[in-house]
Every structure is written in C-alpha cells, then in structure tokens.
Amino acid sequence: MPSFRPEFIHDIPKHWAERAPDALCLHLAGGILSYGALWQRIAAARDWLAARGVGQGDRVMVVGENCTEMVVMLFACSTLHAWPIQVNARLSPREIDGIRAHAEPLLTFFTSNVSDVAAAHAARLGAQPSDCAALDPNFTVLRAEHAPQRVEAAEARDIATLIYTSGTTGAPKGVMVPHAGLTVFARISATSRDLGPDDIAYGALPLSHIFGIATVLMATLYAGASLVMRPRFDAADVFAALRSPGLTMLQGVPTMFTRIMALAREMTARTGQTGATAFPRLRYLYTGGAPLDPTLKRDTEAWFGQPLHHGYGITEYAGSLFITRKDAPRADCSAGYIVEGVEIAITDEQGQPMPPGERGQIRVRGPGVMRGYFRNAGQTAEALLPGGWLNTGDLGYLDADGALFIVGRSKDLIIRSGFNVYPIEVESVINAFPGVRQSAVVGRAAADGNEEVVAFIETQPGTTLDVPALQAYLRESLAPYKRPAQVRVIETIPTTASGKLLKQPLRALVEGNAAAA
C-alpha cells in the first residue's frame, strides 16, 4: 500500500505516471488507458487550457457524464490552480444556467462525446468542438463573453474543486472543496479498503458528486488501482464488469444496490448462481451517500456472501467521516467508526453536547471541512461554526462502541403529536414488507398544525402491493404516531443523479394534493 503524501490532487496521477506508466488506470467502453497515457492527456489539456488564457483563480465548468475527459479536465485544472466544476448533464437547462451564472466559468465544456443530454445543452448554448488533441473531437466548449474575475491566489491554490449541491429549492450552493481534504481522504480510503494495484473498482457514481470524486476516483488512483469508467449506472453493466475485467471493488449508493439486487434475483432464478459463486474476484462491497436499509443490507450480504460495508459523508466534507472496519464488519446499519483526523460532536439545537447515546445534531471538524460556499457568505456562516466546526444538518447518535448511527436530516424530521418521527425508521420497516423495492417518507402539514406521515412506495417489478396487509403489518410494527396516514404507490421514487432519494418532489405532490382538497 503506497504512503506518499500528495499536496494537490493532480500529484496522485502524476505519481503513478512516473513510477508505473504502463499500469492500467481506466477501463473504458472503447479500450483501456494507462497511468502514463492519462498523464500525457492531462499535460496536453493543461497546455491547451493555458494557451486559451486559463490560469490561477479561473473557473472551468464541465457539463457531463463520466468519461476520460472529465477525469482529464479535473486534474488539468488542478495543475493550473484553476477550479474545475463538474456538473451532471442530467440537470435541467434552468439548473445548468443557474450554476454557470453563479460560478462564472471562463470556459464551459460539454461531454457531448458520451452524453446525449450534454450534447443537447451544448447545442442550446452554441458550444463548439474544443480542437484539443488530448480530448475527444466531440468534447465541446463555450467561452465566456467577458473574462470573469479571478479568485485571489492563496484561495485559488487551496481549493481543488467546486461541487454544486443538488439542493431542493433556492439558488445553487457551490461547495469549495480543499485539496488537503481530498488528498488526505484518498489515502485513508485506500488504506481502509486495502486497495492495491491489482484492484479494479467500478466508476458509475457521477464525478460531479463527492462520493464519485473522493471515494471512487481519488482513492482508486491513490492506490494505483484501475477503474471501470461508465457515464451512467446500469445494473446489467455492473454484472458484465464483474465478469470482465473482474471487479474486486463495488461501491455505490443504496439505490444502486437496490437495482443490482433486483437483477441478482433474476440471475439466481435463471441460473441458480449467486454472487458468491459467480464473481470470486469481488472482495469488497461498500455503500454510502444515504442511510442503509437493513433489508437491503441483509439481502445483499446473503447474495454476495460477504459484508456490505457502510460509511457516512457529506458534500461539505471531502470524503467519508465514518467507515465500517473491513476486518470487523457490523451486523447493524451503523455508518461505522470515525476516520483519522475527524472530530465529532452530537449536540442539541443550541450546540450543547448531548449525553452518550442520545440523538442530536451532528457537528464535525477536520482537514476535509469545506472552505465555505462560493460567493455565499450568509449560508457559509450558518454551516461553518466557531472553532472550525461544520454543522452537517444531519441527526444521529454514537453507541457505546463509538459507532455512528444516522437517524435522518434535520429538515426531514417529522413532528407528530409532539413526538419526533425519523423517516429512516419508518422506511426501514416498510422496506422489509414483501414486494417493496424502496420507500420514501415525508411529512404533511395537518389542519391542526400537526404533521402527518405520508409514505411513497416503489414496488418490485411485476408485484402488486397488498395495501391492507401492509397497513396491518405497520400497525404491528410501529407506534401509532409513526404510522403513515397515507400510503401512495408510485412507479418510481425520484432520485438525484447520484442516486439519492429526492424528497422535495414528493413533498410537492403532498402539498399539491392538500391545496386541491
């Protein structure tokens, strides 16, 4: 396991290009790319960007889906101390335009070579081929009409990337992610998983998301391992990659594993095989980015014959804050144990420490804490507290062993009859009912000023939900104040591009129905 200490994120691919240039780095649909070849493209893109005026403190935006060009631009910008902004192309025109207006990039690129939605954005905005020899000819670019103001030099060198949070309402927030956080976590993540050059990971998590950048890309490259790069997640492609080139690491958000398991059941019914027998190279499963449901954990572990590890992280911290231990997997859905360099405090709303085992707000500090929200001093002040603490907005508690349990988001908490209802608890119970693929629980304002619990359910393919039986099951399984006042079956629960459940559209549905009534 390597132990070098990179200062900037581009030091990671450079390290392996110098020491093992022929080692495999990226497995692509059209072939493979070595570390040496990747660095050659990074250097060529750096020179191309510099020749077009990109320098320290500029912003460079990439509207796209995962591909070599997104990796190249991330590191090429780092070499110039410009800020790369990777934005998922599946965002709407309004969202893309809002981020561009806020970030003011000098150049905006579009991965039209691998993404029809990126190509549509490019066509709408009048982007042209980049003419950079290191990039695909269909990788297009748009230049700002006027050169935006650059960020001050010291700040420019400190920040590795801007990640815009998906949010639910209001203006976009650009999280300023420090080099120090990503480089430290790359080492921690690679070490915790015993990653090495022989490992092959799967990269369908968007590179516009901290999970995709930190846990998947940076950790894999830090270890000198290789990555199967895919523009979008597709469960069938995961099974193909497990066979060839033979994944050893499989990481994703819980909704990805939900879809993997749906296909796994079909495979077992068809061939009689399970993951334990069909994919002997696979040695590590990991999920994060959202709470882990116990039913999903149980089914995944049973089918693959190995633990499903878990962790906790947020966009505002570069990398995971807690990870389960590889050599001591847990039977519960804990997010694991605190990682090197991180401190945590569980507090009440006033910031006073809660007794051990009590639920409260999660505050953290460490090298990965964001430097703030770009051009948003007000929201930065709400998140970054005195003493270097970051208010995560999440709720949780620590058990006697020091393991962290996430119970929900502060904004998702439902107050029913004076009691706190944590949606994840209700969702976990619903998800264990036969025929349920996944569920999402939201609150609905009642006429008396109280809140009611509303559950949205996505069923397994070909399954008709027995709602009376479900309601009887919930009466046996949940206290009265936690039981849904309404159960709604929908075709697909909306998710973000990174696979997180999107609850704002569900709240809008609930509020719209209430207004109509």
Image: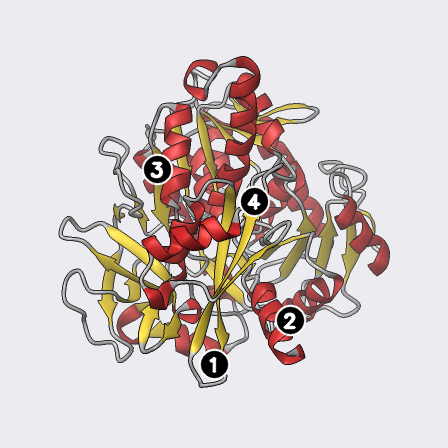
| Residue pointed to by mark 3 | 309
- Label 2 packing within 10 angstroms: few (<14), some (14-19), many (20+): some
Q: Nearer the viewer, residue 75 or 455?
A: 455
Q: Which mark is residue 21?
A: none
**Mark sitting earlier along the chain (1/3):** 3
Q: Is residue 513 above or below residue 24?
A: below
Q: Is residue 207 above or below residue 509?
A: above
Disc 2 versus disc 3: distance between alpha carbons? 37 Å
Colouring scheme, one of rainbow, by chain, secondary structure, one colour: secondary structure
Q: Is residue 129 above or below residue 274?
A: below
| Residue pointed to by mark 1 | 378
- Label 3 packing within 10 angstroms: few (<14), some (14-19), many (20+): many
Q: Quadrant of the N terminus?
A: top left
The amino acid at mark 3 is His
CB contact under 8 Å: marks 2 and 3: no
Q: Of circles 4 and 1, which is in front?
A: 4
**Mark sitting earlier along the chain (4/1):** 1
| Residue pointed to by mark 2 | 102
Image coords of residue 207 (percent x, y): 57, 46
| Residue pointed to by mark 4 | 459
CB contact under 8 Å: marks 1 and 3: no
Disc 4 on helix, strand or loop? strand
